[in-house]
Image: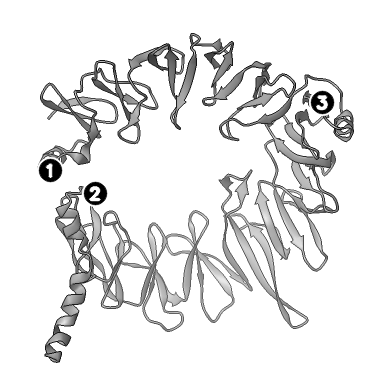
């Protein structure tokens, strides 16, 4: 009896595993071709109708959705590769396969050192298996290192040796230009022994392998455009290095930020709280007297917050564009701003309504409690004379006066009628004008698109359902604001909610449809462009 239980135990354990193929088929989930796992814990690929594309015999498969032209798999402890049809490209005889870039793969023949080469999607050797490790360098180069030699060999995609470096290592350094766009430069690492201790020094190289920062710095805090913020630990010097002039500027500050939109540098004091501003010529534009300092545009307008709280806007000449000195400030606050020119209206608490990337901002007058609007490049659009100011997108905003909302557009003025309320629906810039008991869907030019019974509701990524007071539905595109007529008897649904047999017929026709809906007993299909077809 005990022997029988031991024989049955593996089967019982396998039966407890989830068979995702059966689960997907039973629940009629129509996915794109995807990876499944069977009750034995082995992976395979199936199409959107659960037909097997690659058999369930793999312990590991890299991609979840769809077979790629080169898909890494593991079978019986060894690695190989499949093509998009599930056929074997590389036999399952390798100890490791790793993607280096979308068209090249590192393939290790054994666990011994220097047994790794580079292959293409056809399974042909591009670089012979004489190295220990391959890695991407920039957009088009590949680095190769061996266990015995200290250095890096740099290859082109076709396997041609471009250059060999001895005594240094290279890898991608994803620095950021103004905090958003990757420069994709290469970082240099050099090991040096000083007084018996291993020290590492860093530098930078362009993708054409030109050295722009010599590897003599203990740390690279950031690099952006023509500049890097670096640290020489042995000299305890932090500062800016300019690539074009090959000049290092030691600076006595706790930290310096990357160049802003106007090309200047915000610095933080070391011995006292406060932020200031440096020019590219290393001249101090503002002393470190501010609690916050934020560049608004390339013209050099800065939103500043005094150490004691109030906020205003200055240019690099010291002109006060949005003033806070009469906003109930203490004497020291007033003195800070009097260091510049004493002019401008009395405003405080400038802030971004929706996102720091939007060019429109609202601000508040502390005495009257009224709101105004400031533009990224145009400056002051409205004095603080409105009960409320709300930003919709880059060019549209809502102003409230005398308990009435109105839609405004930059450069044009008011573009809609006045309503008791205009609301923005969720994260999508739908505008709903509420007039008495009537709910109106407004366009971005202030025009009335439709009278609706309720706010729009999402039915796919870009498409929304709207209902009129008669109970009929239409479909609206959230970007273009184009819509169908109110022809649907029920709220349209996503295409995957149709029965599998219907979806199979639709799939064979080769067209992509987003939604389906019923109208007068007929089923209509809709695509992302709102084209209709009777099923």
Residue 159, x across and y down, in percent: 43, 64
Residue position marked by numbered label 2 in the rendering: 32
Q: Quadrant of residue 394?
A: top right
Instruction: Quote the CA–CA distance across marks 1 and 2.
Output: 12 Å
Q: Earlier in the sequence, mark 1 or mark 2?
A: 2
Instruction: Assign a secondary structure to mark 1.
Output: helix
Residue position marked by numbered label 1 in the rendering: 504
Decide if residue 104 is on the left or right side of residue 345.
left
Residue position marked by numbered label 3 in the rendering: 319
Residue 58, x across and y down, in percent: 24, 70
Decide if residue 300 is on the left or right side of residue 331.
left
Quadrant in which the N terminus appears = bottom left
Pick whichever, 121 or 284, lies toward us.
284
Instruction: Assign a secondary structure to mark 2.
Output: loop
> Can residue 86 be seen from the camera position used here?
no
- Residue at left 60%, top 35%? 356
Task: Give the answer, above or below, for where 209 lies relative to 493.
Answer: below
Residue 353, x across and y down, in percent: 59, 30
- Residue at left 58%, top 65%? 170
Q: Quadrant of residue 93?
A: bottom left
Residue 188, x across and y down, in percent: 63, 64
Asked whether the residues under the numbered discs 2 and 3 touch, taking CB atoms below 8 Å apart as contact, a structural biologist would say no
Decide if residue 205 is on the left or right side of residue 436.
right
**Total tally of numbered discs in the picture:** 3
Instruction: Assign a secondary structure to mark 3.
Output: loop
- Residue at left 72%, top 33%? 303
Task: Give the answer, above or below, for where 464 lies relative to 240.
Answer: above
> Can residue 323 be seen from the camera position used here?
yes
Q: Residues within 10 Å of mark 3 (few under 14, many from 20)?
A: some
Pick whichever, 475 or 238, lies toward us.
475
Pick whichever, 162 or 427, lies toward us.
427
Instruction: Quote the CA–CA distance across marks 1 and 3.
Output: 68 Å
């Amino acid at each position: 009896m005990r022997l029988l239980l031991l024989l049955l135990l593996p089967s019982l354990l396998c039966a407890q595993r989830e068979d995702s193929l059966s689960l997907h088929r039973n629940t009629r989930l129509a996915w794109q071709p995807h990876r499944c796992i069977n009750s034995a814990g082995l992976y395979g690929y199936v199409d959107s109708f659960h037909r097997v594309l690659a058999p369930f015999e793999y312990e590991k498969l890299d991609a979840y959705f769809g077979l790629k032209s080169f898909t890494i798999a593991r079978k019986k402890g060894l690695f190989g590769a499949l093509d998009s049809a599930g056929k074997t490209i590389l036999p399952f005889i390798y100890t490791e396969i790793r993607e280096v870039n979308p068209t090249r793969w590192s393939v290790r023949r054994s666990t011994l050192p220097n047994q790794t080469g580079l292959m293409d999607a056809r399974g042909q050797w591009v670089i012979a298996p004489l190295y220990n490790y391959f890695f991407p360098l920039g957009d088009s180069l590949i680095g190769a290192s061996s266990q015995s030699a200290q250095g890096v060999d740099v290859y082109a995609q076709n396997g041609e040796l471009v250059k060999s470096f001895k005594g240094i290592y290279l890898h991608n350094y994803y620095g950021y230009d103004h905090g958003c766009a990757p420069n994709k430069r290469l970082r240099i690492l050099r090991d040096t022994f000083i007084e018996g201790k291993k020290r590492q020094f860093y530098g930078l190289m362009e993708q054409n392998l030109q050295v722009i920062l010599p590897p003599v710095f203990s740390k690279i805090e950031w690099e952006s455009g023509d500049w890097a913020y670096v640290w020489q630990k042995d000299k305890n010097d932090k500062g800016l290095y300019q690539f074009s002039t090959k000049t290092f500027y030691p600076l006595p500050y706790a930290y310096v930020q990357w160049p802003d939109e106007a090309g200047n540098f915000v610095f933080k004091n070391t011995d006292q709280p406060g932020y200031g501003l440096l020019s590219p010529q290393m001249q101090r534009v503002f002393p470190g007297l501010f609690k916050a300092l934020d560049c608004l545009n390339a013209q050099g307008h800065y939103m500043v917050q005094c150490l004691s709280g109030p906020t205003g806007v200055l240019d690099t000449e010291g002109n006060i564009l949005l003033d806070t000195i009469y906003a109930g400030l203490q004497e020291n606050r007033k003195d800070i701003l009097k260091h510049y020119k004493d002019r401008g209206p009395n405003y405080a608490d400038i802030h971004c309504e929706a996102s720091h990337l939007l060019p429109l901002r609202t601000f508040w007058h502390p005495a009257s409690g009224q709101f105004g609007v400031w533009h990224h490049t145009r400056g002051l659009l409205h004095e603080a004379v409105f009960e409320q100011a709300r930003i919709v997108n880059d060019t549209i905003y809502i102003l409230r006066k005398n308990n009435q909302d109105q839609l405004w557009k930059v450069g044009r003025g008011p573009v809609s009628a006045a309503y008791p309320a205009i609301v923005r629906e969720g994260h999508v810039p739908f505008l709903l004008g509420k007039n008495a008991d009537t709910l109106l869907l407004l366009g971005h030019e202030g025009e009335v698109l439709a009278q609706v019974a309720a706010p729009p509701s999402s039915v796919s990524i870009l498409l929304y359902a709207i209902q009129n007071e008669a109970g009929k539905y239409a479909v609206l595109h959230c970007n273009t604001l184009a819509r169908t007529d109110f022809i649907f008897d029920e709220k349209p649904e996503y295409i995957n909610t149709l029965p599998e047999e219907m979806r199979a017929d639709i799939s064979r026709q080769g067209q992509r449809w987003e939604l389906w809906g019923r109208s007068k007993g007929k089923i209509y299909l809709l695509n992302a462009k709102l084209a209709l077809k009777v099923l």
